[in-house]
Image (cartoon, helix red, strand yellow):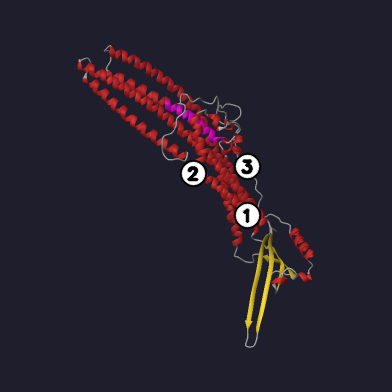
Amino acid sequence: MDGIFLKWSSFPPHRAILALLMTVALATACKRGPDFEPPVTPSPADYRGAVPAGESVANVPWWDLYQDPALQSLIETGLENNRGLREAAARIAESRASLGMVRSDLYPSVTGLGVGFYQRTGQADSVSNFDNFKLAASAGYEVDLWGKIARSNEAAIQGLLATEEAYRTVTITLVADIAGAYLVLRDLDARLALAEANVEAFSESLDLLETRAAGGLVPTVAVNQARVELADGEAVIQKLVRARAQTENVLSLLVGRLPGEVARGESLSELGFPPEVPPGLPSELLQRRPDVLGVERALHAQTALIGVADAARFPSISLTTSFGIKTTSLGELVSTNSFLNLGANILGPIFNAGKSKARVEVERAKAEQLLNQYEQVVLNAFREVEDALVAVETYRLEHEARLRQLQAAREGLDAAEALFDGGLISYSEVLDLQRAQFGSQLMVSEALQLHHSAIVQLYRALGGGWTVEETGS
């Protein structure tokens, strides 16, 4: 539909502007599409098993969870340099800029125009000159009659909030990965020290056995057994050295630097446990986990897009106005004629073979997908917390059992060595107990590391407060 234009001479300027404002005010916007309501998902009244009561451990800042300066330094470096975290921050900047573009549609757009030209026309017996100068400004505004722009703005806001929650998810995962890799590294340090001590003990035993074998006090087979164990221990050392170097490389990648050595702090045995690790109430989980909140924001944004698609099925009204001055002489530009044009455009679909309706159904289907994704994320959140709670408790008990096993292995080895020195048992029996002691030492270290790592995973599963803003406090 063509616009309706009113000239300044026939329509006083103050009445023209008043008419324009009244037209906008009377065009009452009504948002199309459903209003978002947070999904209602089932949640347990409490976690399975006996858990410590009290405020959730997730409320403890990460730097208070483990008092290890080396670990704290690694985490701070990772929060500054990790490329994945920077990428997530860039997505926030992109969403914020996109929101600014959408919000600009809520306001009129104004453009300026300046025109000046000189025309000279020559004929057989005459020459005519013509000047034309014009300064003008034009404004356009789409009346949000059906809430399309408002819904678009709503979707953009929720999209921005979703990217912010995604940033928090990346942050929490990053810190948990750094802490977990550091704990594995300290476990490998402890294992390597045990392996080196074990090899040293085997070397001393081999020297003693070779001396006794030369004097005919022990059979040659005992010497061969000792050499086998010594070579196996040396191979274990190389295996642990390789794993430790690769773990350092993983940590270097996480903190955003080239592969290299990683500074150490306290050993696993010196790294104290938090006094208790209460998870808090299950109802708090959905308000804390950023991945849950992120999907909820995305679902909110998609719900708003249903309204955008629905509003597109109805006519849109655009108001335009232009005003300025024009003259045929540059010197008379200030004191010459002025003009004002007002217009209204109505644009709407008449027949498009059901395409507009199909667009609405597409957006509804996308919202249904996100709803199911949200419910899946909620279920997974509770599963991760339950898994971590079970891991914390069982690894604690496993570590205690491994300590008892190690104590028994030490006592058995001491007794076996005494019997061997007295010639009452063979060296193979001593070797069996030496292997048992070394294996028990390794399993004690592993169980201790897994207990610490389980606490880290519980902290992550609860949506612990690992954010950049907190590190600055």
> Magenta includes 458?
yes
- Residue type at numbered disc 3: Val
Identity of the residue furthest to the front in this view: 331
Quadrant in which residue 205 is drawn: top left
Above or below 369: residue 21: below
Q: Residue at x 58, y 55 (%)?
A: 362
Q: CA distance from mark 2 to mark 3?
A: 36 Å
- Residue 324 drawn at (x, y percent): 71, 67
Kindly state the secondary structure of the residue where label 3 is placed: loop
- Residue type at numbered disc 2: Arg
> Magenta includes 313?
no
Disc 3: which residue: 40
Query: Which residue is at the front of the view, 12 or 305?
Result: 12
Q: CA distance from mark 1 to mark 3?
A: 30 Å
The magenta span reads 445-465
Above or below 7: residue 189: above
Quick one: label 1 or label 3, which is nearer the N terminus?
A: 3
Q: Residue at x 51, y 27 (%)?
A: 393
Quick one: label 2 or label 3, which is nearer the N terminus?
A: 3
Disc 2: which residue: 83
- Which numbered disc, 1 or 2, marks the residue closer to the eye? 2
Quick one: label 1 or label 2, which is nearer the N terminus?
A: 2
Disc 1: which residue: 102
Above or below 231: residue 289: below
Tell me, for residue 283, which label it has, or none: none
Quadrant in which residue 126 is drawn: bottom right
Kindly state the secondary structure of the residue where label 1 is placed: helix
- Residue type at numbered disc 1: Val
The answer to whether residue 246 is visible is yes
Q: Residues within 10 Å of mark 3 (few under 14, many from 20)?
A: few
